[in-house]
Amino acid sequence: MTPETPRLRTEGLRFLSRRRPVLARLGGWSLLEAAQTFLFGYAVARALDHGFLAGRTSVGLGWLAAAAVAVAAGAYGTGRVFRAVSELVEPLRDGLVRRVVDHALESADHGAVSRLTHQVEIARDTFAGLVMVSRSFVFTAAGALAGLASLAPALLLVVVPPLVLGLGLFLVTLRPMARRQETFLAADEEVAEVLDATAAGLRDIAAAGAEARTATEADTRFDAEFRAARTLARWGVLRVLAVAVAGRLPVVLLLVAAPWLLRRGVTPGDLVGALTYLMYALLPALQSLMQALGTAGSRLTVVLRRLTGRPSVGTPAARPPEGEPGARGPAPSGTGTGREENPPRPAAVELRGVTFAYGPHAEPVFRELDLTVPAGGHLTVVGPSGIGKSTLTALVAGLLVPGRGEVLLCGGPVRGAVHRRVLVPQEAYVFSGTLRDNLTYLCPDPPPDSAVLASARAVGAYELLLRLGGPDATVAPRELSAGERQLIALARAHLAPVPVVMLDEATCHLDPAAEARAERAFARRPDTTLIVVAHRISSARRADRVLVMDGTHAVSGSHDELIRCSALYRDLAGGWSEPAGALRDANGVHTIAGARLAGDRGHVVAHRSVGQVQAVGDLGDVRPLGGE
C-alpha cells in the first residue's frame, strides 16, 4: 500500500456517499440481471424434468419461453444499468477535469494537456468498466447461488467450496499483483527514458567514447524491466490458477459427484441447470472480475494518483540540487555553483527566493530562484529561446517586480538602485538629436570629449562616430542600421557611470569580432559587473561563469565545466559552433563582413533572430559580399 492509497480510498468513499440515490437505482436495475440469471438456469432445469424428459413438450417449451422472457427483461435492465453507471461516472470525470484545470492554472502543470485528453478518459473508462464488472459479478453470483439452492441444496456443497477457495486465492494475490504491476510500469518508463536520452545524445556519446558506459546503463534498465516482467508473470500464473479453481473446478466436481447427487434426489434437470449456472453465468462473470480488478484496477489506481496528486517537479516543494539557481540556503560566490575556490567578493547582483510569473494564473518563469553575481564578475546567460533570459535581466534592472522574493543591486533593493545599472536590450534605442546627446544622456554630469571618444573606441564605435561627423553630428535613427544603433547604445552604456551592465542580446546585429571587442571592453572596465544574454558560444567562453537555463533547472559553471556536466549546454554549444582561425581573431572566431574588414563600405551584417541563431549560419554563403 502506497501513502496515497488511504487518501484515494477516503476520497472514493466520499464520492460514492454523495451519490446514494444513483447507487440505489443501479442496484435496483441490477436485480433484473440477477433475476435473469436465476430464471434462466431454473427454467432449463424445469424444462427438462417437467417437460421434455416427462414427455410434455409443451411444458418444456413454456419453460424455455419463460427463460427467453427473463433474458429480455435482463437486457432491459442492463440498458438502464448503463444509464445509471453514466450518472456515476460522468461526475467523476467532471471532478477530475476541474481538478486538473485548477492545478494547471495555479502551478502551470506542463502535463495538463495529457491529463485532460488522455488520463482523465482512462480514469473514466476504467472506473466505468470496474463498476459494471463488479456489479455484474455480485448480482450474477447471487442469482446463480439462489438458483442452485432452489434446485437442490446439495449442489451448493459441490459448487461453493471451490468458488470460495478460488476467490480467496485471487484476493490474496490482488495486492502483490498490483505492486508488481506498478513496479513493471515504473521499469518500463525508465527504459523509455534512457532510450530517449540515448537517442538524443548519440553524437555526444560517440564523441566522448561513452558507448560502453551507455550500453551498460541501458542493459541495467532492461534487466530491471525483465525481472519485473518475470515476477509479474509468476503472479499471473497464480491468478490463472485462481480462475481455474473458482470457475472450472466446480464443473469437474459436479460431473464427478453426479452419481452421488442423483442418489440423493438431484434430478438430471437439476444437474443441467447447475451446469448452466456455472458455464454461462458464474464462470464468465468471474473471469471478467479477475481480469478487471487485476489490470484495470491497478491502472485506475495509478492514474488517479497522478491526477489527484501534486507533481514533484516544478513545484515550490521541489528543491533543485545544491549549487543551482533555485536552491535555498546561502548564495555562494560566483553564480550559484556552490564552490568557493576564491574568497567571496561582495555581491553586485543578488536574487533571493525570487518567483515571477506574467499574471496570477500563468506559469512561473522563475520559482524560488537564488542567484548571486559578485562585484566585478562576468556572467553569461544562455538557454533556449523564450526560457526567461530577458525576464531575468528585466528583474535585475527593476523593470519587473517579482511576485515573491527580493532582488538586490549593490546590496540594496533594486527599486532604489536603478542609477547603479544599465540595460542594453536587443533593439537599441537611438533618438533624434546629436550623437553627443545620445551617448551622454545616462551621465549625470557632461563628460569630456576624451571620455566620449575613449568609450567609442573601446566598444568599436569610433569609426562610426567619425563617419557620422563627430560627437556634434545630428543623428537620424531611421538612417542607421540595426548594428549601428547597437554600437551607439553600447558606447552610451560604456560611458555611463554605473557598476552593473546588462547586455540582453545587445550585439546580435554585430559580427562576432565586433561583439567580442564590445564585451571585452565592458569586462575590462574598472569596477564593472557584466551580465550578458548570449547568442554565440564565444560569449560564453569569455565569461567567468555561465548560467544555463532550461525552465525546470538551471546550472552554472565555467564553459569547460558545463561542457562536461550539462547536456543542454553541450547541445547549445554544438549548435553554436563557430569556425575559427580565418582572420586570426583573438577569441578564435571566424569573423564575417563588418567594420574594419577589407572591402567594408560601412555596412553591418544583421544576425538572425535571438535564441534561434547558429553562428555557422553567418558563414553559410561563402561568396564575396556585394561582389567584393
Image (spheres, helix red, strand yellow):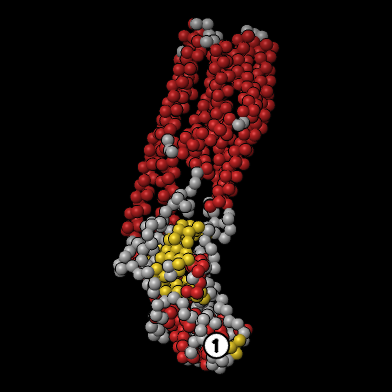
* Residue carrying label 1: 436
To which quarter of the image does residue 627 belong? bottom right
Residue 310 x, y percent position in the rendering: 49, 46
In the figure, 265 relative to 400: above or below? Answer: above
Q: Is residue 326 left or right of residue 57?
A: left
Observer able to see residue 499: yes
Residue at the image position 35 percent from the left and 69 percent from the top: 345
Residue 366 x, y percent position in the rendering: 49, 60
Q: Nearer the viewer, residue 55 or 338?
A: 338
Secondary structure found at label 1: helix
All told, the count of numbered labels is: 1
Residue at the image position 45 percent from the left and 28 percent from the top: 171
Q: Nearer the viewer, residue 335 or 405?
A: 405
Q: Nearer the viewer, residue 486 or 509?
A: 486
Residue at the image position 39 percent from the left and 74 percent from the top: 376
Q: Quadrant of the N terminus?
A: top left
In the figure, 519 relative to 600: above or below? Answer: above
Residue 623 x, y percent position in the rendering: 51, 85
Residue 515 x, y percent position in the rendering: 46, 80
**Which amino acid does the dot numbered 1 rest on?**
Arg
**Badge 1: few (under 14), some or many (20 or more) residues near its Cα, within 10 Å?**
many
Residue at the image position 40 percent from the left and 77 percent from the top: 527
